[in-house]
Image (spheres, helix red, strand yellow):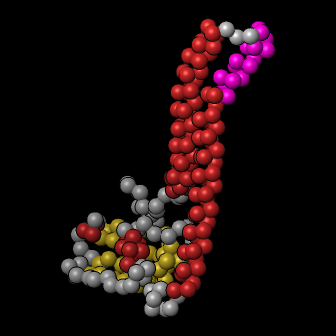
Amino acid sequence: MVKSYAWESIAESRVTRVREEELGALKSYCGYLGCLVGAAVQMPSLLLLSALAGHCYLYGAADVEVVFVCLQVLSVLRNTVHQLAASSAQLVAARPPLRRLENFLKEPEAPRLPGRVPDWVEMWPERSGVLRIQGNFAWNAGGTIALHNLSLEVPQGKLVAVVGEVGAGKSALLLAALGELFPARPGGRVSVPILVH
């Protein structure tokens, strides 16, 4: 499609812009992660120095016993700080997928749910008939029309091939037949014999 309409430069500029935004986000992420890991690696040494300096300030000079006790306590803290840094990096990396998952789960449900048929889908109890799809259909309620002025009738026992370019609406047509697209103005109607299911 891009090649046939000579849209290479437009497509390249859009992909380049998106890629630059992605690289900028990755650079920021790596910078923040590097600062976090660097602070976590240096934290035990800073804790040791601050603990010894505080002890010397409050109690005078530190003897060997105090230094060894501080070293043991801070070695335990070092492992905890390393684990905290690793888990923080994983939390930062998990934020974008969690946001995408949250947006997906907040999307409105498909119009056809188990045990419930939408108003614009008519189910025929008899085991013969014609599959009819008429009208306009959209992916979302009140959204942009995906199928315009559709008028399709498929009699029982007929073999039908749906052929078209990428993005022509083949999958949308099948979803409309299943009742999973929303009717758009001025309206859409699907008549489905139970035999189809």
Magenta includes 92? no
Camera-nearest residue between 4 and 166: 4
Q: Is residue 173 above or below residue 36?
A: below
Q: Residue furthest left?
A: 157
What residue is shown at x 51% (from left), y 73% (from top)? 138
Magenta includes 47? yes
User: Could one spot residue 77 in this view of the protein?
Assistant: yes
Q: Residue furthest bottom?
A: 5
What residue is shown at x 63% (from left), y 13% (from top)? 67
What residue is shown at x 46% (from left), y 69% (from top)? 181
The quadrant the C terminus occupies is: bottom left
Quick check: 141 left or right of 48? Answer: left
Position in image of residue 192 (x %, y %) = 33, 71
Residue 123 lies in quadrant: bottom left
User: Could one spot residue 191 in this view of the protein?
Assistant: no
Q: Is residue 157 above or below residue 83?
A: below
Q: Is residue 159 above or below residue 64?
A: below
Residue 169 lies in quadrant: bottom left
The quadrant the N terminus occupies is: bottom left
Q: Main secondary structure of the magenta part?
A: helix
Q: Which residues are magenta?
A: 46-60
Camera-nearest residue between 126 and 170: 170
Position in image of residue 122 (x %, y %) = 39, 69
Position in image of residue 168 (x %, y %) = 42, 82
Camera-nearest residue between 169 and 12: 12
Camera-nearest residue between 115 and 30: 30
Q: Residue furthest right?
A: 57
Quick check: 150 left or right of 21? Answer: left
Quick check: 151 left or right of 100? Answer: left
What residue is shown at x 27% (from left), y 83% (from top)? 161
